[in-house]
Image (cartoon, rainbow, N blue to C red):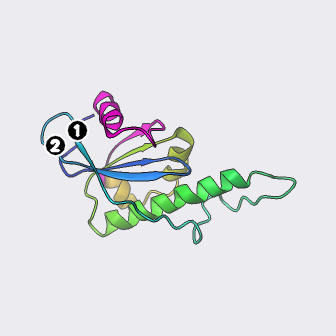
Amino acid sequence: MQIPKGATVAVADGEKFNLFQNISDNTEPTLKALPDTDVDTESNNASGGRKSSSANPDQGQADEDNFVGGIADVLNRRVLNGKITGLVVIAAPKALGELRKHYHKELEAILVGEIAKDLTGHSIQDIEKSIAAA
């Protein structure tokens, strides 16, 4: 996958979130890490009202869904503010599915591509190779 210079790359799963920027003019991406971003999980109920109880002990999944919903809020806000003009999303398959539920139409319009793969905690070189191979 070729991505434009200046494009933002979001790498996420249900617990971690990192942003990178492509600084390369050529066909191979060269990523630079961007500062960490706080993700608000309190105001977000991305899990569709899923609650933990003894009958449904899946609080961990609800927490992950809320975190992913918070990531979508961050990305949507940055797109709407003009801070992101091209976006590649790399996320664990389950997280990517939850993210898609929250994409704003403006985010969808500038989305360069998606990769359903968990690369959180991987090196920048691994992320660059995955983009190049996609």
Q: Is residue 127 magenta?
A: yes
Residue 24: % across, % down: 16, 43
Position of 125 with respect to 48 (left or right) is left
Residue 5: % across, % down: 17, 47
The residue that appears at 57% across and 42% down in the rendered structure is 94
Residue on which disc 2 sits = 24
Q: Which image quarter: residue 122?
A: top left
The residue that appears at 33% across and 60% down in the rendered structure is 35
Contact? badges 1 and 2 (CB < 8 Å): yes
Residue 34: % across, % down: 31, 56
- SS of the residue under disc 1: loop
Quarter of the image that includes the C terminus: top left
Mark-to-mark CA distance, 1 and 2: 6 Å
Residue on which disc 1 sits = 29
Magenta stretch in the rendered image? 110-134
Neighbours of disc 2 within 10 Å: few (<14), some (14-19), many (20+): some
N-terminal-most mark, 1 or 2: 2
**Residue found at the very far top of the displayed protein:** 133
Residue 86: % across, % down: 27, 52
Position of 62 with respect to 10 (left or right) is right
Q: Which image quarter: residue 78?
A: bottom left
Indicate whether 25 appears above or below 1. below
Indicate whether 89 appears above or below 133. below
Q: Is residue 123 magenta?
A: yes
The residue that appears at 35% across and 53% down in the rendered structure is 19
Quarter of the image that includes the N terminus: top left
- Give, as a three-letter code, the residue at label 2: Ser
**Residue found at the very far right of the displayed protein:** 54
- Give, as a three-letter code, the residue at label 1: Pro
Neighbours of disc 1 within 10 Å: few (<14), some (14-19), many (20+): many
